[in-house]
Amino acid sequence: MVEIKPWLKHYPEEIPGTLEYPAASLHSYLLKAADEFPDKTAIHFMGKNMTFQEVKDSAVYFAAYLQKLGVKKGDRVAVFLPNTPQAVIGFFGILLAGGIVVPTNPLYTERELEYQMKDSGAVAIITLDILYPRVSKVIQKTDLKHIIVTAVKDALPFPKNLVYPFIQKKQYGIVVKVTHEGNTHLLSEILKMPAATLEEHPINVEEDLALLQYTGGTTGFPKGVMLTHKNLVANVIMCNNWMYKCRRGQERVLGILPFFHVYGMTTVMILSIMEGHTMILLPKFDPETTLKTIQKQKPTLFPGAPTIYIGLLNHPDLKKYDLSSIDSCISGSAPLPVEVQQKFEEITGGKLVEGYGLTETSPVTHSNFLWDRPRIKGSVGVPWPDTDAAILSLENGERLPPEEVGEIAVKGPQVMKGYWNRPEDTAMTFRDGWLLTGDLGYMDEDGYFYVVDRKKDMIIAGGFNIYPREIEEVLYEHPAIQEVVTAGVPDPYRGETVKAYVVVKEGATVTEKDLDEFARQHLASFKVPRIYEFRDELPKTAVGKILRRVLVDEEKKRMKDEEQKHA
């Protein structure tokens, strides 16, 4: 007999095994924070502060304007922005208008953007001026009716706001002039307009979607994960209880994790708004800028990914900076090397623990304890409150006893409603109420979980989820390629990196440089293969299916042989 929830006996008394979740909409927490902390800094961005009252007022203005444009309850609106104050205003403004947020990676190419807009049926999008040309080129092929444009300079203090356009021109080589007319709207103009009346929509927190977060798998293009208000609120309440030493309204949260990823959205943006913490936002990860920001702004919470912590630890001037303000970090998105964990704790004096989750679970389901409990090497920790987890047999789906490897499955209030317009995919992902994660792992006698492999062939590089088939479909368009398969191979910095195995058509010639340039035209940079290997043939099954796993195993063996040779 498998003991049910053996992990609960390890919970410190400060963490209840079950929690209460108010029937409150996600955006109601912004209104509540503005009432409780009106003059407190909600966002610090590159030298400029915004109070909770200012964020709320801007979000309400934006929401009323969206309604004026015809956005109705349940309409999807995309946020195509890096981590800026406008991303927060856009997110909560869409929810206040009754819409559903579609977070969209600003690194996306036209092809990727067009796919996500079509699939989600988004009717409007908020984006940066430098991304406007990309949106303009796809708008006719989608349901998009309106483009709301903002600029980084709009969020900067004087005189940075005057200097930034010149920096942007030098960095990106373009200057985009956008006017407030037709279906193009400037956020800076919207926020100057007389206040419009906001029509409030009743929200069913258990059923109504707050988010359409895109993720994917090896069987096709990214899928829209339907997350309700309750899913997201529940996960943040769990997170707040897990970090029980944090003080309401007193923490400073470093926001490097992108808000277009549900992990950054939940652990930085929503947590900070719900708890009255200050967000310190950085639009992209740069080790030196991050170190300077930590020293000057003194964040106490630092959710991150292994790539970020490794990037800081490897900076040549690390010892020049004071990182002692950092108290708590939960690492996600990819496995956290033990040596990185230990070194980062030595440098900061804070705690860094590994967690686990999925986009489909809003996203966190497991984590190690931050305080008062011993560290379990190699484990992703135990399930959070109200979260059940099990290891299910791959043969018959039955619950396996401790130490046996099977598929990790989870249940809980943070688990998604399903995939957008994909009932078959939804049905395949659930079994008897369990969400099947696609990850292989085991649970020990104490209820700690370990991830040993992935059923899916998804590649996780630098915390980004990358789906091989999407890359392969692009490479197959190159006229010189006969066959191609991509796989994640071990990388000391990114965790994994993308490698493409290529068979060239007879009589054709193509170089690694040619393929790199071709891929960069159609894929976001983090998806572009870093390594190409040209082969005469690829390993296949009897029915002609390429054996990706064989190639991955060959790569691991080759790297192991290399290590032994140099040992």
Image (cartoon, rainbow, N blue to C red):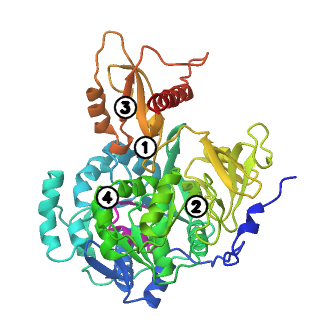
Q: Residue 518, image x and y in percent?
A: 29, 32
User: Residue 366 appears in which quarter of the rendering?
Assistant: bottom right
- Please report whichever mark, 4 or 1, sits nearer to the chain's N-terminal start: 4
Under tag 4, what secondary structure? helix
Looking at the picture, how far across and down is residue 171, in whole percent?
Answer: 17, 54
Distance in Å between CA atoms under marks 3 and 4:
24 Å
Mark 2 or 4: in front is: 4
Give the residue at mark 1. Answer: 492
- Residue drawn where x is 29% and y is 32% of the image: 516
Q: What whole-number distance in Å separates the C-alpha atoms at marks 4 and 1?
A: 17 Å
Q: Name the residue type under label 2.
A: Val
Residue 481 in the image: state x and y as whole percent: 36, 21
Q: How far apart, in angstroms, are the residues tagged by discs 2 and 3?
A: 32 Å
The residue carrying mark 2 is 364
State left or right for residue 159 relative to residue 436. Answer: left
Q: Which mark is residue 146?
A: none
**Eye-nearest disc, 1 or 3:** 1
Residues rendered magenta in the picture: 77-98
Q: Tag 2, which secondary structure?
A: strand
| SS state under label 3 | strand
Q: Residues within 10 Å of mark 1 (few under 14, many from 20)?
A: few
Q: Which residue is mark 3?
A: 531
Residue under the image location 46 percent in, 15 percent down: 537
| Mark 2: few/some/many CA within 10 Å (<14, 14-19, 20+) | many
Report which residue position mark 4 lands on: 287
**Quadrant in the picture for residue 277:** bottom left
- State if disc 3 and disc 1 touch (CB < 8 Å): no
Residue 195, percent across and down? 32, 84
Q: Amino acid at mark 4?
A: Pro
Say whether disc 1 or disc 3 marks the residue closer to the N-terminus. Answer: 1
Which kind of residue does numbered mark 1 sit on? Pro
Seen at 22% across and 73% down, the residue is 156
